[in-house]
Amino acid sequence: MSSTYSGNGTSPTSLGYTPIAISSSTNATPIVVTTGSAHGFSPGDTVVVENHAVNTNANGRWVVLATPTGTTFSLAGSTGNGVGGATGYVIDYNVGPAITIPSDGDDFKAGAFNPAYQALEDHAPFLYERVGAYRLYTINRTAHSDAIDQGTVGTVSVPNTLTWTTIATFAYQWSFARNINIYNTDVLLVQASAFLVVGTGSNVNAIALGAAFNGGSQTLVSGSAKGIYQVSTQLTVNLSATLYASDFTASQSNSMVLSFMGYNAGVSSQTFTVENPYHVNVYHYRAN
């Protein structure tokens, strides 16, 4: 009778790209992962583990080793660096729909069709990961408001100390139901716009994007600053910058907060106010 082939072993197409919560992982070689519900994996399946804490060596793309049980599986070639708890997800790496291939006894002989079908399916995961140096991992509208009501998002008195001061912050979150996970090799393109009001006075001011990882302090995103030299400034600012995660963190990050930052080179403190409408969008790229 006919059989189903998915292109990376016999991973279940019914699960698709749905994240499966991880209950625990072992500090062993190889790492054994336990899930909160049945995963359906088979030996040779390709899976991705994301956002697993403590035993962070489990994060990444793996092949399922040996014969998994209903809620446990091992990661081929892995070595633990701690006992992991109930954090993170595992995702079946079946990137395309499974196909039905004929077997002996069907209308067409399996030997005439199976190799061609399998070759086409095997290319799908490879091409998904390997086209280009980076792939677009996700697009996220971190914060936005289209209201034209001058509602204040953040207002701060920026001293003339020639330092960057945070005006308003926005937590970067996934647009679907799993936690953020940023690796030090990731690149994020940040695009932001806002209505900015700066206090009166002849000053050389500037606005820029800031970022903070894992609860750290806001730090200027290099290349995002835009100068302002006006009296009683009221204007719409558009900022865009490439944020290299390696500039902010040496390893995996579980949280990031973006911000608008103000700079005052004048003779006295100036009030910076970010008002509606404002938008902050993130294009998250991951290295192949």
Image (cartoon, rainbow, N blue to C red):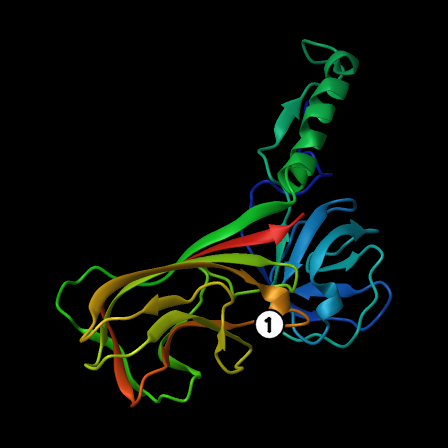
Quick check: can you spot residue 217?
yes
| Residue 65 located left or right of residue 38 | right
Quadrant in the picture for the N terminus = top right
Indicate the position of residue 30 as horizontal and vertical percent values: 84, 63
State the residue position of label 1.
248
Residue 173 quadrant: bottom left
Which residue is nearer to you in this view: 122 or 137?
A: 137
The correct choice, above or below, for 157 with respect to 12 in the image is below
Q: Residues within 10 Å of mark 1 (few under 14, many from 20)?
A: some
Indicate the position of residue 203 as horizontal and vertical percent values: 28, 79
Which residue is nearer to you in this view: 271 or 4?
A: 271
The residue under the point 84% across, 51% down is: 66
| Residue 275 located left or right of residue 33 | left
View extreme (left): residue: 149
The residue under the point 78% across, 44% down is: 44
Indicate the position of residue 38 as horizontal and vertical percent values: 63, 56
View extreme (top): residue: 107
The residue under the point 57% across, 57% down is: 187
The correct choice, above or below, for 111 with respect to 189 in the image is above
The amino acid at mark 1 is Phe
The correct choice, above or below, for 282 with respect to 200 in the image is above
Which residue is nearer to you in this view: 284 or 161?
A: 161
Indicate the position of residue 285 as horizontal and vertical percent values: 56, 52
The residue under the point 62% across, 38% down is: 128
The correct choice, above or below, for 271 with respect to 151 in the image is below
Find numbered disc 1 in the image and state the secondary structure of the residue it sits on: loop
